[in-house]
Image (cartoon, rainbow, N blue to C red):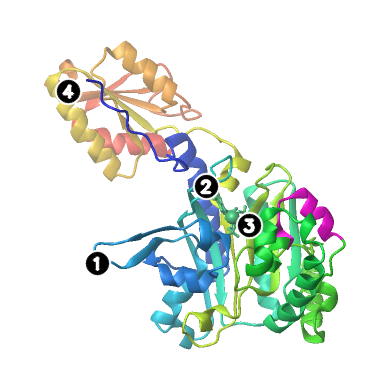
Amino acid sequence: MALERLQTLRGMVDLLPRQTMVWQQVEEQARHHFHRAGVREIRTPLLEATALFARGIGEATDVVCKEMYSFQDRGQRSCTLRPEGTASVVRAAIQHGLLNQGHQRLWYMGPMFRYERPQAGRQRQFHQLGLELLGVAEERSDVDAMAMAWDLLGDLGIQGLQLQLNTLGTPEDRRCYREQLVGWLEQRVQQLDPDSRQRLATNPLRILDSKNNTTQDLLREAPQLLTTLGKESRERFEGVCQLLQALDIPFVITPQLVRGLDYYTHTAFEITSDQLGAQATVCGGGRYDGLAAILGGPPTAGMGWAMGIERLVLLLGSQKDATPPQVVLLNRGESAQVRALVLARQLRQAKLHVELDLSGATFARQFRRADRLGGRLAVIIGEQEAQAGVVKLKWLHHPPQSGSDLDMGEEWTLPAAEVSKTVERLLAD
Ligand code: ATP
Ligand code: MG
């Protein structure tokens, strides 16, 4: 009877070695950027109480209504695989009293889970890299955060970037605007798509974010939040724009940008790339001054963003191959294989990058493979060498310029006890 082949669940993706190399590049760059900016890493659990997201993201959002992986655990608690990072980070900051210790500059990276329709750049398990600045309400921190995202994307070499900026004002501004917008839309309900019609009652601002073209056309005429903002919010927004100009970061004001999550206030932004097709947004973020209080903590200003790592990787494409090994250890014969195993360990302990051939194939084949790997120096142990307590060395690629003990094409036989030191010296030349 044929067994059913087990495969990944829909929307869940394996990362194979060729891809993990690009991921590591992204991760390394991000670490450097955050380190230089005094941002420290936080790691929170993947699984949280469902209430955290229901409260922290908002019951009426798509994420909470339609996209969460929620289940009852064995103790009948409702748990959810985190769909995003901000609520968890703020929960952790409250739980551990970080908010009483001055302002916090935190970053995170890891898998998020959303039950969405999978397509290029959209998965059910995906990864985010995120920044959260807690405890500073000033415009400068909005711009500091956006500049970090902009510069990281630039340093990664991502092309065709655009920073789209908007403001959501204060909750009071939004209440006024919501009434205006709902009034205006109610007179045009017939022209709205079904999804937006539903949102009219639950989350009308999200209609601005609709992907439906007819709705988008209609909205061009709708009242805009930017023109109904209170004086303070307007001045704040102008301040943010001026600071971005001072940093020479280009941006486009995008009134329909409202972001999917409910707790945003003032600055909202997205960074898109024109190379991504439909899933154009690589980074989204904004200010969320109301969140800490919603989660039962002290009222605390917050500003942050999250980038989708899959989308970054799509943009970077598959990149160069693995770095070639410094040493390839060729070996054949019973006692030679044991010696080779021991020697490989020794050389690795000396911090060398060593590939141990485990194939048991002929030396001719092992040499061909070593060549393919791009290895630099071959260490060869056959039965004869093993019996005599010696090994042979031979350059495969890139011999030193000149004056080395070993020229290209030559073989050098030396006592096994001296290999480690000699190899280190040859490679250091
Ligand atoms: P979108 O409009 O693309 O659904 P969003 O507003 O739901 O994005 P955020 O919650 O702001 O996205 O998440 C920040 C970033 O995380 C997005 O800009 C995107 O790069 C990435 N992202 C979000 N959802 C997914 C997903 N399902 N698969 C891959 N990346 C995602
Ligand atoms: Mg989404």
Q: Quadrant of the N terminus?
A: top left
* Residue corresponding to mark 4: 336
Picture coordinates of residue 154 (x, y %)? 68, 53
SS at circle 2: helix
Check if mark 3's residue and mark 1's residue have beta carbons within 8 Å.
no
**For disc 3, does the CB lie below 8 Å from ligand 1?**
yes
Q: Residue at x 82, y 73 (%)?
A: 226
SS at circle 1: loop
Q: Residue at x 31, y 68 (%)?
A: 77
**Residues shaded magenta:** 208-220
The CA span between labels 3 and 2 is 18 Å
The CA span between labels 2 and 4 is 38 Å
Residue 391 appears left or right of 53: left
The first of marks 3 and 2 along the sequence is 2
**For disc 2, does the CB lie below 8 Å from ligand 1?**
no
The first of marks 1 and 2 along the sequence is 2
Check if mark 3's residue and mark 4's residue have beta carbons within 8 Å.
no
Q: Give amino acid for label 4.
A: Ala
Instruction: Assess whether residue 320 is covered by the magenta stretch.
Output: no
Which residue in the rendered view is the most extreme toward the right? 221
* Residue 88 visible to the viewer: no
Q: Residues within 10 Å of mark 2 (few under 14, many from 20)?
A: some
- Numbered badge on residue 283: 3
Above or below — where is 84 with respect to 38?
Answer: above
Q: Residues within 10 Å of mark 3 (few under 14, many from 20)?
A: many
SS at circle 4: helix
Q: Give amino acid for label 2.
A: Gln
